[in-house]
Amino acid sequence: MNSYQYSNNVLHFDGVALPTLAQEYGTPLYVYSETALTTAFQSYEQAFAANQPLICYAVKANGNLNVLKHFAALGAGFDIVSGGELQRVLAAGGDASKVIFSGVGKSIDEIQLALQVGVKCFNVESLPELDRINAVAAELGMTAPISLRINPDVDAQTHPYISTGLKENKFGIAFVDAMGAYRHAAALPNLRIVGIDCHIGSQLIDLSPLAEALERLLVLVDQLAAEGIVLQHIDIGGGVGIVYNDEAQPDLQAYADTVARLLAGRPQHLVMEPGRSLVGNAGVLLTQVEFVKVGESKNFVIVDAAMNDLMRPALYQAYHAIAEVAPHADVPAVLADVVGPICETGDFLAKDRELAVVAGDLLAVKSAGAYAASMASNYNTRTRAAEVMVKAGAHRLIRRRETLSDLWKDEIL
Ligand SMILES: Cc1ncc(COP(=O)(O)O)c(C=O)c1O
Ligand SMILES: N[C@@H](CCCC[NH3+])C(=O)O
């Protein structure tokens, strides 16, 4: 779905003129399209219709309560990685029984909370974690539903910082140790084995490593069945990559067909944990040009958004497309880096872009629905930007801009 449209030379997002939002709420500003959220969720439902999966939206991609509430209303479950994310899901009206709890370092408090509210399962990433969950469950007089996250040692061919399924990554239980770990779990009285899980990385464009990882999981599923451990679900991990620039659009239907073929005839229910592809291209970061600075060897478009609002370029050298909101016919284009006001050389949103802008112009940094607001910080004592939801020409504020007093209210003078 293309949510962008120029009308009267002004960029509209899901039918809303972006300058209207800048005027009403200020910049920087995250803007999300509810229509695009719905479309992305439904494209998973449609592609995987044969398997009727539980789609557990990965909260880390964008945890705004309104985004969570919207996905909950569409029938989503949630993939969480902290007690905080669990509380968010509950605050948004999400159903705990559709929550899976991932992450390598679950604390005792987090496990207690998850058990008390009745999550669907813990995706366990190590033997000591199995022991901890068993002990916490025993103390509460409960049985914890668990699934083991297997590290299949498959190269996801993505940025090394967002690859998770290689031997050298901290995630999951090594494939060779998996059967031993399941036997260990089966012997613990306060655990109930319900599933298997893997997640090999994020922003995958070539989907063949996902199929390879699933094939490896199925070997284990069969070995477990032979030992009398029959799993209820198979969790295939995160979603497909999105188009930021000139990547080929990953073929979701082809991936779904492969999954359906591999799972055919098996009794297990399909679970998945997509994040980025449900929200990434449903969001933009709207920012205003402060100055155009002509440097000795480089030009800089200095904007009011910075790496604290969108960390991906600084952290992964990630590319985000940038559009002029109201293009000028009479301003010459310059080749420039788009940078923020933060005191770091790494504070850039884009490198070497052709832009025809003057101070006061608005720019829309695209693909900012995922891992943007959720990774924001207060570095340089910058307040977190507001968030707005748009839908078919209407808009509503879903998070106020943080105030300075919010920033130091917990500091003790
Ligand atoms: C365990 C787990 N599940 C789900 C996701 C979401 O992945 P994506 O945003 O690529 O769909 C991640 C992030 O990589 C993850 O680590
Ligand atoms: N934050 C990353 C994705 C992290 C995936 C979590 N395991 C990004 O922006 O691409």
Image: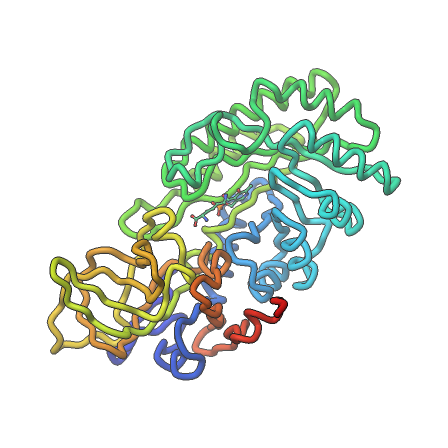
Residue 217 is left or right of residue 378, and the answer is: right
State how many labels appear. Answer: 0
Towards the viewer: 346 or 15: 346
Residue beneath the point at 37% across and 43% down = 250
Residue 133 is left or right of residue 169, and the answer is: right
Q: Is residue 115 above or below residue 236?
A: below
Q: Quadrant of residue 226?
A: top right
The quadrant of the picture occupied by the N terminus is bottom left
Q: x and y percent of residue 85 in the render?
A: 63, 54
Q: Residue lying farthest front?
A: 413
Towards the viewer: 377 or 32: 377
Residue beneath the point at 42% across and 62% down = 309
Q: Is residue 357 above or below residue 378?
A: below
Q: Is residue 364 above or below residue 330?
A: above
Residue beneath the point at 69% across and 33% down = 129
Q: Is residue 101 above or below residue 30?
A: above
Towards the viewer: 366 or 42: 366
Residue beneath the point at 66% across and 63% down = 92
Coloured how?
Answer: rainbow
Q: x and y percent of residue 394 in the render?
A: 47, 78
Q: Quadrant of residue 333?
A: bottom left
Q: x and y percent of residue 366 in the render?
A: 35, 61
Residue 341 is left or right of residue 119, and the answer is: left
Q: x and y percent of residue 397 in the render?
A: 52, 76
The quadrant of the picture occupied by the C terminus is bottom right
